[in-house]
Image: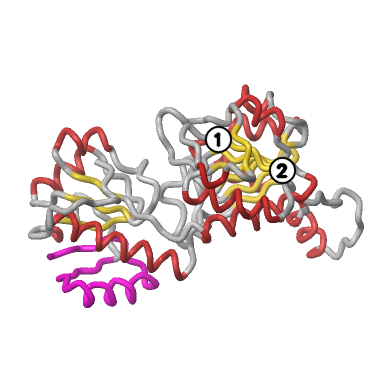
C-alpha cells in the first residue's frame, strides 16, 4: 500500500518508519498540511493520514479526484472533517484510538490544579507573595464528581476519581456496565445540580454543541469546577466567562477551547493571536488554559500512528475496520 502522512511531526517520524517497515507500507512523510496546493502529492495513494486540518467539501473532492478513497485522522475527534460531504462524495473516513490513560491522567492533574488553586499559588510565588489568603484548596475526596461521557477515556477517569474517594455520578446515552459498581448514572439536570466538579469526555457533535451553556451553568452548584479535555465546542465560551466573572464557576481547567484550529502546535510567540476569548480566559486567576496536550504521551503517539496505518491497511484490504466512521 502507498500512503502519505500529512502534518508529520518529528516525534511521529520514528513510529511511522517503524510501522511502515513492519507492515510493508510505501510511505511518504510530509510536514505540509493537506491543501489544494499539496493534493498532488497524494496521487497514487488510496489512503492519506492527517491530523486536525479542516477537511471541507472542496478539499475532500480534490483528494477524491486524485484517487484517494480513505482518510484516516490521527485523532479520536473528527469534527474537523465534513462527514456529510464525505458520505456524498464517496470518501471513507476513519479516526484512531489510543491509550485512554493519557487523557485520563491529564484530567486528574487538571482537577487537582483547579481545586488546589495552583495557578494563583504559582503566580503569587513568582512575585514572592507567599500569603495564604485566597489560595485555600479543596480535597477531592469531599467532592461529587460529574462525568459527562463514559466511553474509553471517561471510564478510566471515573476509576481515577473513585480511587480518590470521590462520589462519582455520570451521564451518557450509552451506559458503561463495567462502571456501575462505583458510578451512579443520573439524568443530565441532576448531574448539573449535584456535582461539585464536572468533567467532559465526549466527541463534538451537532447534538452536544454547547452542552455547557448559560442555562446549564445556572443549574449548577455555586462554585462548581469545570474540566474540559475533550472538545472546545462543548462549552459556550461566553457563558463560561460570564459564569467565572459572576462567581458561579469557582474554577476551570481547559485543555481545549472553541476556535482553536490553526492555533495550537505552532510557535506563535511573536504573532498577534485572533482568539480573543482565549486571552480573556487566560486573564482569570482561577482559569487554566492549556494547548490541547492531554493526549500527548509516547504511548499515545505510537498508538495514533500505528492505528492510522492499520486502519488504512484494513480499508485497502476490504476488511472490517473498527476505526471507520464514514
Q: Answer whether residue 5 is magenta in the image.
A: yes
**Among the two numbered marks 1 and 2 on one chain, the one whose residue lies closer to the N terminus:** 2
Q: Which label belongs to residue 323?
A: none
Residue at left 13%, top 56%? 316
Q: Which label belongs to residue 167?
A: 2
- The part of the chain drawn in magenta is 1-30
The image shows residue 150 at horizontal and vertical percentages of 52, 43
Residue 265 showing in the rendered view: yes
The 10 Å Cα crowd at callout 1, few under 14, some 14 to 19, many 20 or more, is many
The image shows residue 29 at horizontal and vertical percentages of 24, 68
- Helix, strand or loop for disc 1: loop
Total marks placed: 2
Q: Answer whether residue 265 is magenta in the image.
A: no
Of the two numbered discs 1 and 2 in the rendering, the one whose residue sits closer to the viewer? 2
Image height check: is 311 above or below 225? below
Residue at left 67%, top 30%? 242
Q: Which residue is mark 1?
A: 235
Q: In this rendering, would 38 be left or right of 272? A: left
The image shows residue 249 at horizontal and vertical percentages of 72, 36
As drawn, the residue found furthest toward the front would be 181
Residue at left 73%, top 55%? 119
Residue 280 showing in the rendered view: no
The image shows residue 283 at horizontal and vertical percentages of 68, 46
Nearer to me, 39 or 16: 16
Residue at left 44%, top 41%? 203
Which quarter of the rendered picture does the N terminus lie within?
bottom left
Nearer to me, 132 or 195: 195
Nearer to me, 113 or 308: 308
> Between marks 1 and 2, how big is the CA–CA gap?
24 Å
Image height check: is 35 above or below 296? above
Amino acid at each position: 500500500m502507498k500512503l502519505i502522512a500529512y502534518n508529520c511531526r518529528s516525534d511521529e517520524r520514528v513510529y511511522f518508519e517503524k510501522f511502515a517497515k513492519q507492515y510493508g507500507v510505501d510511505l511518504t512523510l510530509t510536514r505540509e498540511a493537506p491543501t489544494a496546493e499539496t493534493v498532488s502529492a497524494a496521487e497514487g495513494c488510496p489512503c492519506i493520514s492527517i491530523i486536525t486540518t479542516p477537511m471541507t467539501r472542496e478539499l475532500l473532492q480534490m483528494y477524491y479526484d486524485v484517487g484517494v478513497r480513505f482518510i484516516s485522522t490521527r485523532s479520536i475527534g473528527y469534527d474537523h472533517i465534513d462527514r456529510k460531504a464525505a458520505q456524498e462524495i464517496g470518501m471513507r473516513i476513519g479516526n484512531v484510538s489510543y491509550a485512554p490513560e493519557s487523557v485520563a491522567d491529564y484530567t486528574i492533574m487538571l482537577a487537582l490544579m483547579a481545586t488546589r488553586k495552583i495557578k494563583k499559588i504559582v503566580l503569587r510565588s513568582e512575585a514572592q507573595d507567599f500569603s495564604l489568603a485566597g489560595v485555600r484548596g479543596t480535597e477531592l475526596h469531599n467532592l461529587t464528581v460529574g462525568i459527562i461521557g463514559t466511553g474509553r477515556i471517561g471510564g478510566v477517569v471515573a476509576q481515577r476519581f473513585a480511587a480518590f474517594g470521590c462520589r462519582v455520578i455520570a451521564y451518557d446515552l450509552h451506559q458503561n456496565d463495567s462502571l456501575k459498581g462505583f458510578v451512579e448514572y443520573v439524568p443530565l439536570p441532576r448531574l448539573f445540580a449535584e456535582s461539585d466538579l464536572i468533567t467532559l469526555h465526549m466527541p463534538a457533535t451537532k447534538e452536544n454543541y454547547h452542552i455547557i451553556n448559560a442555562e446549564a451553568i445556572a443549574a449548577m452548584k455555586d462554585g462548581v469546577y469545570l474540566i474540559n479535555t475533550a472538545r472546545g465546542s462543548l462549552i459556550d465560551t461566553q457563558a463560561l466567562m460570564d459564569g467565572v466573572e459572576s462567581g458561579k464557576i469557582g474554577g476551570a481547567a481547559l485543555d481545549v477551547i472553541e476556535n482553536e484550529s490553526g492555533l495550537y502546535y505552532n510557535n506563535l510567540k511573536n504573532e498577534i493571536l485572533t482568539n480573543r476569548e482565549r486571552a480573556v480566559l487566560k486573564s482569570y486567576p482561577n482559569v487554566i488554559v492549556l494547548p490541547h496536550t492531554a493526549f500527548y504521551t509516547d504511548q499515545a503517539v505510537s498508538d495514533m500512528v500505528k492505528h492510522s496505518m492499520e486502519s488504512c491497511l484494513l480499508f485497502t484490504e476490504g476488511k472490517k475496520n473498527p476505526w471507520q466512521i464514514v
